[in-house]
Image (cartoon, rainbow, N blue to C red):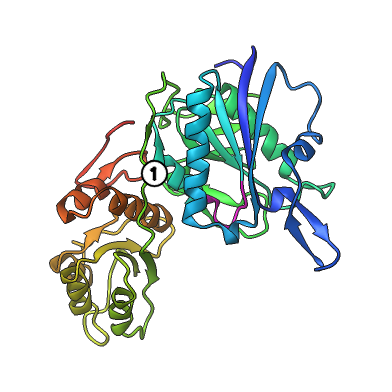
Amino acid sequence: MAEGGSRRICIMTTGGTISSVYDSEIGAYRPGMSIEGLLSGLPKDMGEIEVVTRDLFQLDSANAQPHHWIEIADAIKTITKEDSDIHGFVVLHGTDTMVYSAAAVSFMAQGLGRPVAFTGSQIPASVPWSDGPRNLRDAIRVAAWADLGETCIVFNGEIHRATRARKLRERAHDAFDSVDPTPLGLLGRDIVLYENRMRRTSPKPKFKMHLDEEVFLLKVFPGMKPSVITKIVDLGYHGIVIEGFGSGNIPTRENALGGVIKEALERGCTVLMSTQCPFGQADLSLYEVGKAALKVGALSAYDMTSEAAFVKLMWSLGQTDDLSEIAEIIHTNIVGEITMSPGAGMRGT
């Protein structure tokens, strides 16, 4: 799709570094700049783009909770119903938990047929050398013109699928990377998009916004006591994503975890095995220390990122409490979050 012609987009702000201003009373930056303030720093001539704005909330994304994900998805639902002429969405968000929010919106707001571009910055837009204006310009370009029909993260000239991205750098401008496959596209003189993307389509929206927030993300470490998992279940959690070593491996001798995972499953807690490695997959059939979890009934996240697996488990438990149905949802590729599993063909939206 060429960059030209009249376009109507919606920009939402949720806070984050991009909207932060210096507060002399606390001696630190905090969110506070409005969308209008952010837009005032952009070039005046950006084509025939009509912008609809929504100030949702002003939070550092470290303070974002699952109910904020629902608020973003619900705003998209409302605008989609009220304004069929919207070509795309831009969501301004802090980088710390952007991957979680963007992944959640991917699952909760399916079939939009147009881009939902999350973006932000590593340096506040109120600072002259901020990367915010460039990222915002790029996200606007994607929302307005990109032949893209999915939720993505637009950052530092790259377009990443929301459910395949991770924040890997704390200060550098290239904060995010795609974790297999490659990014969806690049932004330079033109928007360059790759074939692995979902394209723009006629909207057939499906909004499924029920989440079970009682999901725990646990990283296994040498010396971890098995009773930790028992305590998590005691606290009332309905699901646990366990980041195992390597391909999803867990201890099977000292501090063995197989028994407590089995007990957790018997008490109705779904256990999903992931990997601590940024790249790769949880292949529980490869080693004896991986089969220990598989044997007792734990599910494999395969090549889902831990963030995507965590959000997907919340979303899956929000749809059903039937273990076989949960397993089917987990192992079905819904929005491009999983590419290596028994049934990972794209289900579509």
Indicate the quadrant containing the N terminus: top left, top right, bottom left or bottom right.
top right
- Name the foreground residue: 206 vs 295: 206
Instruction: Tell me if residue 194 is in the magenta stretch.
Output: no
Q: Inspect this view and state whether residue 152 appears.
A: yes
Q: Inspect this view and state whether residue 188 appears.
A: no
Q: How many marks?
A: 1
Q: Horizontally, is 126 left or right of 267 in the view?
A: right
Residue depicted at x 48% and y 53%: 67
Q: Position of residue 10 (x, y in %)?
A: 61, 30
Residue depicted at x 53% and y 37%: 75
Indicate the quadrant containing the C terminus: top left, top right, bottom left or bottom right.
top left
Q: Which residues are magenta?
A: 93-98
- Relative to 218, say whether 46 is above or below: above
Dot 1 amino acid type: Met
Q: Which picture quadrant has residue 344?
A: top left
Q: Position of residue 224 (x, y in %)?
A: 35, 83
- Relative to 103, say whether 75 is above or below: above
User: Which is the main secondary structure of the residues drawn in magenta?
Assistant: loop
Residue depicted at x 80% and y 28%: 43
Q: Tell me the residue that label 1 is attached to.
A: 209
Q: Horizontally, is 267 left or right of 339 in the view?
A: left
Q: Horizontally, is 135 left or right of 113 in the view?
A: right
Q: Position of residue 229 (x, y in %)?
A: 30, 77
Instruction: Tell me if residue 96 is in the magenta stretch.
Output: yes
Residue depicted at x 62% and y 21%: 8
